[in-house]
Image: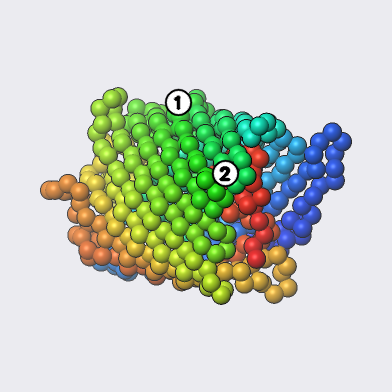
Amino acid sequence: MPTLFRVIALLAACVPAVSRAQHIPHLAGADSARAHVGAMATGLLTTANPALLGRRFTEGYLTQPNLLGDAALGPLRLIGTLNFEGYTLRRGELNAGMYGEGYADRRHPHTLVHEAMLAVGTPSYAGFRATLAGGKGFTPYGTDDPMMRPFVKYPVNHHHAQIIERVLVMGALQFARGDRAITLEQGWFNGDEPVGPFTAPQWSRVGDSRSTRLTVAPFASLEVQASSAFVRSPGLTQGGAFDHRQRSTSLRYDVPAKRYALVELARTDESLGAQRVFRFTSALVESSITHRGWAVSARAERTDRPESERLLDLFRTPSGHVDFQIVGITRWSIGTVQVAAPGTSLPRVRGTHVTPFVEVARASARAQRTPAVFVPAEFYGSDTQWSLSIGARVHAGTMRRRMGRYVFPITSSSAHRHP
């Protein structure tokens, strides 16, 4: 662990120098090449009361440690993200209501290769341009990675609203005129979820799942998206579990460094053939405003979560979610408020910025079906759970405002230096 911390510190010191040299010398027969590199991490202390069985837990983490990069050469663009949570979050991060990949009430670590995508785009003709992309990354479904949004704690709907870290091939067609754009994306990918931060996908399953997303941007700061996905047996890598049919719609308003808002509805149906067995719904609203060096953000969420059997470690479920082990469905209602001071520069480290923050969340869960095997108030020791998180985000080099969109060319607002 100390070695990893030294590596991340070294990256934070070196990245500003790399990102200042963003323009690679012109190559004959190609447009000017560009390369961007950035690094990020969040130091975090969280106390949750009760976390489970009436007990308070207080833990510290280095969360969301990432090395991000992209490079463009003519019509080609390479996008990559390395995520080191497999080293820093092996036990998971306290996060009431969160679930997935063998964790419950803790956020699971993401895979080391978070993104590795190659995209090629056609020239624009009469306002139209096409993109073909392939590699490992985000499927064209749902909303952006919560890691690039204001809050440090992930929403419960992470597995309803995003389908990530899959091997995929996708195509997109975009029509743009001025600040207005319409984009249609279609992707094919492997349905199986990662079973650990260092495990490979099931290559034999690549192409067994699909998703479609339509995004309409009537002007630069506003977009509406609607998407659907069919995911083959995500809970069992060998297949044979329930399939997921997912829907997502959202409205996003974003004026960088000033105002941001997101309204999101998502739904996951677990089915056996044409027969629906379970339905999980989610509604989320979040917003943020920045004024005079302070950012105030608020989020309200109501999301259904499947409850699985717990292991001796009560924050863990059997590896590889098995649908028939569902012992209940709970509806989580969570309110979160964050106050942050973005854009503070580190002395003597040019291009590196720190955002200290305080985040408070109130969560409650109730069984959707009664009588229930899983009774939230008895398991947690209270009808309500509170958490307080104090920490600081560190950004170095060129950061992305968003993550998971591969339509080429990317607009100038998709990557920027922090103020």
Image quarter of residue 94 = bottom left
> Horizontal and vertical percent for residue 398?
67, 56
At 49% across and 59% down in the image, what residue appears? 260
At 48% across and 37% down in the image, what residue appears? 214
**Disc 2 residue type (three-letter):** Arg
Q: Which residue is mark 1?
A: 208
Q: Callout 1: helix, strand or loop?
A: loop
How many angstroms separate mark 2 from mark 1 (CA)?
34 Å
Query: In the figure, is residue 278 to the left or right of 124?
Result: left
**What residue occupies the far right of the structure in this picture?**
28
* Residue 195 in view (yes/no): no
Give residue 343's mark. none
**What residue occupies the far left of the structure in this picture?**
371
- Of residue 418 and residue 347, the one placed in the foreground of this image is 418
At 40% across and 52% down in the image, what residue appears? 263
Which of the marked residues, 2 or 1, is nearer the chain's N terminus?
A: 2
Q: Which residue is mark 2?
A: 180
> Horizontal and vertical percent for residue 338?
44, 68
